[in-house]
Amino acid sequence: FTEAEFYQQNFDPQEYLKEFYSMSNCWEGASAFMMQNLRILHKIFSLDGLRGDILIDVSCGPTIYQLLSACEHFQEIIALDYTDRNCRELEKWLKNEAGAFNWEPVVKYICELEGDREKWAEKQEKLRKNVKQVLKCDVTKANPTGRMSLPPADCIVPTLCLEGACKDLATFCSALRNISTLLKPGGHLVMLTALGDSYYTFNKQTFSCLCLQNHEVEEAVVAAGF
Ligand code: SAH
């Protein structure tokens, strides 16, 4: 099992982005997976009820793809992750700093799904404006943001994170309970979970993944009180 401290020391955000999110450079399986996830997120965030003020991205890593559809419906986005380097990498993109990852192909793809590929620059600006804070969190803690208390969210979005952060199903259930404290009563959970994988690799490093089946995730979500 990959401890959080291993993430803090070894998870290289730029290598992660290059491996899984470069669309042109990354292996075909990765870009197919990402495009499928973008289509799913696009569909979910098109649902009528999925609106509100505050959205919290749980374990955002260095990525923004998961926020591209969401940012049309939530004005205040708070991004959380465990590692300093991931938070920093995300901030780099938000501030449009030199050396930030190029999300353009991904943004264009989602804009195309939404009906107008030409709106990509506008969407980037909207997302940059809507992400108000990037903070540290630990989903294995009862209070994931420690002493920092956040405004309760209308929606929380953990993507591809709890299965990496949790060593077994019991921990996965309690992590779901922990992050549910970030949510308003009646708020929405939008979760992307890898099923049936027990690890992932990039940059010659292997990270564990809790091997989950669909029904286990569904039961855990219900058990956590969602
Ligand atoms: N959401 C992104 C990143 C997933 S990678 C995506 O969809 O691609 C897994 C992320 O989980 C990493 O960013 C890592 O820093 C984070 N993570 C690992 N252990 C964690 C913990 N205990 N609490 C919060 N985040 C954790």
Image: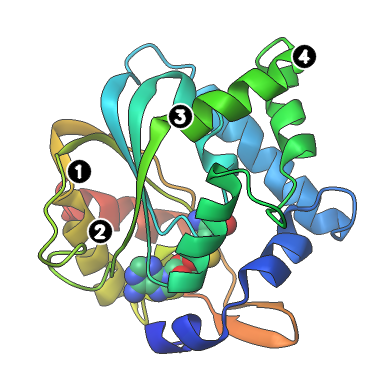
Kindly report the distance in space between the C-alpha atoms of the residues bearing marks 2 and 1.
Answer: 9 Å
- Other residues around mark 1 within 10 Å, as few (<14) / some (14–19) / many (≥20): some
| Residue at x 58%, y 33% (from the top left corner) | 40
Depicted 76 relative to depicted 58: above or below = above
For disc 2, does the CB lie below 8 Å from ligand 1? no
Q: Looking at the picture, which amino acid does disc 2 mark?
A: Leu
| Residue at x 25%, y 58% (from the top left corner) | 176
Q: Looking at the picture, which amino acid does disc 1 mark?
A: Phe
The earlier-in-sequence mark between 3 and 1 is: 3
> 148 or 42, which lies in front?
148
Give the side of residue 132 with respect to residue 222, left or right: right
- Other residues around mark 3 within 10 Å, as few (<14) / some (14–19) / many (≥20): some
Kindly report the distance in space between the C-alpha atoms of the residues bearing marks 1 and 4.
Answer: 37 Å
Give the side of residue 164 with respect to residue 52, left or right: right
Depicted 54 relative to depicted 6: above or below = above
**Residue 150 location, x and y as percent?**
16, 47
Tally of numbered tags: 4
**Residue 26 location, x and y as percent?**
84, 59
- Identify residue for label 2: 176
- Identify residue for label 4: 118
Residues at circles 1 and 4 in contact by the CB criterion of under 8 Å: no
- Give the color scheme: rainbow, by chain, secondary structure or one colour: rainbow
Q: Looking at the picture, which amino acid does disc 3 mark?
A: Lys
Residues at circles 4 and 3 in contact by the CB criterion of under 8 Å: no
> 126 or 177, which lies in front?
126
Kindly report the distance in space between the C-alpha atoms of the residues bearing marks 4 and 3.
Answer: 19 Å
- Identify residue for label 3: 129
Between marks 4 and 3 in the image, the one whose residue lies nearer the viewer: 3
Depicted 207 relative to depicted 130: above or below = below
- Identify residue for label 1: 226
